[in-house]
Image (tube, rainbow, N blue to C red):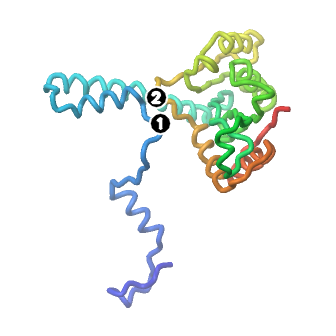
Amino acid sequence: MLRKCEKYPDLENFVKYEFYLKYFNENFNLRFGRPQVDACSECERYGTRLKDANLNENAKRETAAELMVHKRRAKKFYNKIKQVQALCSEQPEVMGLAFDYMQNMPLPHIPVQDIFYLRQLWVFAFQIHNLKDNNGHFYTYHEGLGQKGPNEVCTFLNDYIMNHVPSNITELHLFSDGCAGQNRNQTMVRFLLGLQATKRFTKIYHYFPIRGHSFLPCDRDFGCAKRNFRKNDRIYTPEEYEDLIVTSRKKQPFTVKQIR
C-alpha cells in the first residue's frame, strides 16, 4: 500500500502500486532501451546512407524502401517463431526447438592480468530451447573433447530428441542461425532426412533468419546465464560453469548435461 496522498487526507482506500504501473504501461508510449550490441550491417548501411546530406530525394526514398523491405523480411522469422509457439500450445503433436551455441567461456576465469595474454582452455555450451514448454537444456564440454561443428550439433539434437521429445510428436519445427559450419550444411540435411526416413517425424521444418537478425529464444537464456557469471569473478572448473547455469534461472531452471 502507498501512503495516503497529502492532497486528499480523507481518502479511505489506498491506491496500489500495481494500478499506477498498469496505467503507465497502457497510456504512455515510453521505452527504456539499451545500446545495441550486435547490429545488422545492412541496417547500418541503409541508416548511414539516409543520413548523407549529399543524397538526393529520389535516392533517399529508394534507400528507405529497401530498408523497409529488409526489416519486413527479418520480421517474418520472428513472426514464424510466434506462430509455432501458438501451434505448439494448440496441437499436442507439434513441437518447436531453437538451438544455438553460447559465447565461448574461458577457463580459468580469474581477475589476473597475466591470464589475458596466456592460452586458455575454452568451454563450449550448446543450448536447445523447447518452444512448447519454455525449458532450456544445455550441453557443456571443453575444446579438448570436441569442436563446434555440424557433427556436434547433430549429436546433441539427436540426444535431445531421443531423451526429451515424446513419441507422440510427429511434426518438428527447428530454428537456428544460418551458420554454414554448424547448422546450414549437408550434415544437418542428411541428419534430418534420416529422422524422417526412420518414421520418427512425418514433417520437419528448419527455419533460418536473414543475416544480422538472428536473435533466438536461446539468446534470452544466455543472458540469464551471463548475468550469473558476472557475479562470480573466479571460475576454475567446468563444473562451476555448470552450477552457475543451473542456478541462473529460478523459475523453470535450466538442465545441463556435461559431456565427458
For numbered disc 2, what is the local secondary structure? Answer: loop
Instruction: Tell me, for residue 38, which label it has, or none.
Output: 1
Three-letter code, disc 2: Gly
Query: Would you say 142 lies left or right of 72 here?
Result: right
Quick check: 143 above or below 179?
below
What residue appears at the point 15 percent right and 28 percent down from the top-left corner? 54
Q: Position of residue 141 (x, y in %)?
A: 77, 33
Viewer-closest of 23 and 98: 98
Query: Would you say 2 lies left or right of 246 here?
Result: left
What residue appears at the point 68 percent right and 54 percent down from the top-left corner? 233
Viewer-closest of 71 and 122: 122
Judge whether residue 123 can be spotted in this image: no
Q: In which image quadrant can residue 8 be found? A: bottom left
Q: Which residue is mark 2?
A: 212
For numbered disc 1, what is the local secondary structure? Answer: loop
What residue appears at the point 46 percent right and 23 percent down from the top-left corner? 210
Neighbour class for label 2 at 10 Å: few (<14), some, many (≥20)? some
Residues under numbered marks 2 and 1 in contact, where contact means CB atoms less than 8 Å apart: yes
Quick check: 198 above or below 163?
above
Query: The C terminus lies in which quarter of the figure?
Result: top right
**Disc nearer the start of the sequence (2/1):** 1
Quick check: 208 above or below 236?
above
Neighbour class for label 1 at 10 Å: few (<14), some, many (≥20)? few
Q: Position of residue 242 (x, y in %)?
A: 77, 44
Three-letter code, disc 1: Asp
